[in-house]
Image: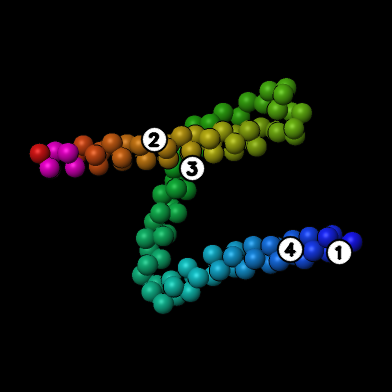
Amino acid sequence: MILLDLVDIILYFGYGMVIIGAVLAIGFPLWIASKNPKSLAGTGMGLGSIFVLFLIAWLLSGSEVYSSYSEFGVDASLSKFIGGMLILVYMLVGLAVSGIIYSEITKSLKNG
């Protein structure tokens, strides 16, 4: 019995730490941004560009529903959303790899 009580206490402590961490992860950037509202412009542009990329990916994705999908309750709109998210991930990975390659090439050309 004492062991189970100890496990419960540790679990509740862990839940509390996760909640505190989530509140701090959301609240601290908002607190910093309230001191410097101009910093929100860059954040807004970043979120806006990701939204535009998702919109492009969503428009490119198909809405096919295979029989194996319907077992899990996936309909046409959810299939299109999932496809859009997958294409968005592919686009972001491609952009990241392209940026790394570009920066390495320009760095090697500048250094000689």
Name, please, the residue furthest toward the right.
1
- Quadrant location of residue 78? top right
Q: Which residue is drawn at the image coordinates 70% and 33% (left, top)? A: 75
Q: Which residue is drawn at the image coordinates 40% and 72% (left, top)? A: 37
Q: Earlier in the sequence, mark 2 or mark 4?
A: 4
Instruction: For marks 2 and 1, give the CA distance.
Output: 53 Å
Q: Are marks 1 and 4 in contact (CB under 8 Å)?
A: no
* Residue 2 place in picture, x, y as percent: 86, 64
* Residue 50 place in picture, x, y as percent: 44, 48
Task: Say which amino acid is labelled 4.
Answer: Ile
Residue assigned mark 2? 94
Q: Earlier in the sequence, mark 3 or mark 2?
A: 3
Residue assigned mark 4? 10
Q: Are marks 1 and 3 in contact (CB under 8 Å)?
A: no
Query: Is 99 or 36 nearer to us in this picture?
Result: 99
Instruction: For marks 1 and 4, give the CA distance.
Output: 12 Å
Q: Earlier in the sequence, mark 2 or mark 1?
A: 1
Residue assigned mark 1? 2
Which range of residues does the magenta coloring cover? 107-111
| Residue 54: mark | 3
